[in-house]
Image: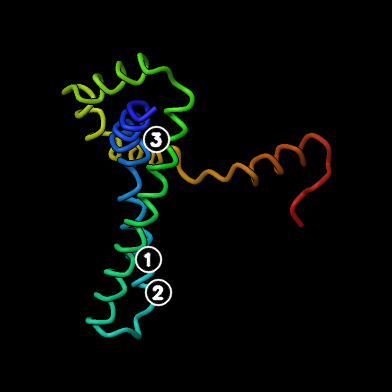
Amino acid sequence: SAEALRLGRQLADSGTLATLLPLVAKKDSEELVAAHPELSASERAALRATADRVFAAGRERLMDSEARALAGRLSIADLRAIAAFQRSGAAQRYRDVTPQVIATMMESIGKMDFKADVLAAYCRQTGKLCAR
């Protein structure tokens, strides 16, 4: 329904993905700019502006997709309850600290490579698929 889609979009816009996407985009954009030192200052600014436009368009597609998925999988009552929580001060504080919590967590864990870890464990267990 229209209400479910509206509520789904509210949830998408205030969800974890929406909170983290700008951080990822900024990191990737700055890495892209740094990878091209041959660009002039104005060209670097234009590249950043292009990245901002591409990010905005991609974010819209992702948020719309998440909204449709939420609207299709949660009841109106659930969507309303979650939306009410998302408007609360506690939810806002949660969103505010989420990026720092994830950064702290990733620092404390160190490098993780799931595929490499699985292959190493499988190698130890079976002697197969070992790195050469």
Q: Position of residue 25 (x, y in %)?
A: 35, 56
Q: Position of residue 108 (x, y in %)?
A: 39, 37
Q: From the viewer's perspective, is residue 48 above or below residue 61?
A: below
Which callout, 3 or 2, points at the residue further toward the start of the chain? 2
Q: Which residue is mark 3?
A: 67
Cα–Cα gap, marks 3 and 2 = 35 Å
Which callout, 1 or 3, points at the residue further toward the start of the chain? 1
Q: Which element type, helix, strand or loop, lies under badge 3?
A: helix
Frontmost residue, 37 versus 56: 56
Query: Residue sitting at 39 percent across and 54 percent down?
Result: 58
Cα–Cα gap, marks 1 and 2 = 6 Å
Mark 1 or 3: in front is 3
Residue most toward the left? 89
**Image quadrant in which you'd find residue 29:** bottom left
Q: Specify the amino acid type for callout 3.
A: Ala
Query: Residue sitting at 68 percent across and 39 percent down?
Result: 118
Cα–Cα gap, marks 1 and 3 = 30 Å
Q: Which residue is mark 2?
A: 35
Q: From the viewer's perspective, is residue 5 above or below residue 116?
A: above
Frontmost residue, 37 versus 116: 37
Residue 88 relative to residue 19: left or right: left
Q: How is the image coloured?
A: rainbow
Mark 1 and 2 residues: CB-CB less than 8 Å, in contact?
Answer: yes
Q: Position of residue 92 (x, y in %)?
A: 20, 29
**Image quadrant in which you'd find residue 115:** top right
Q: Which residue is mark 1?
A: 31
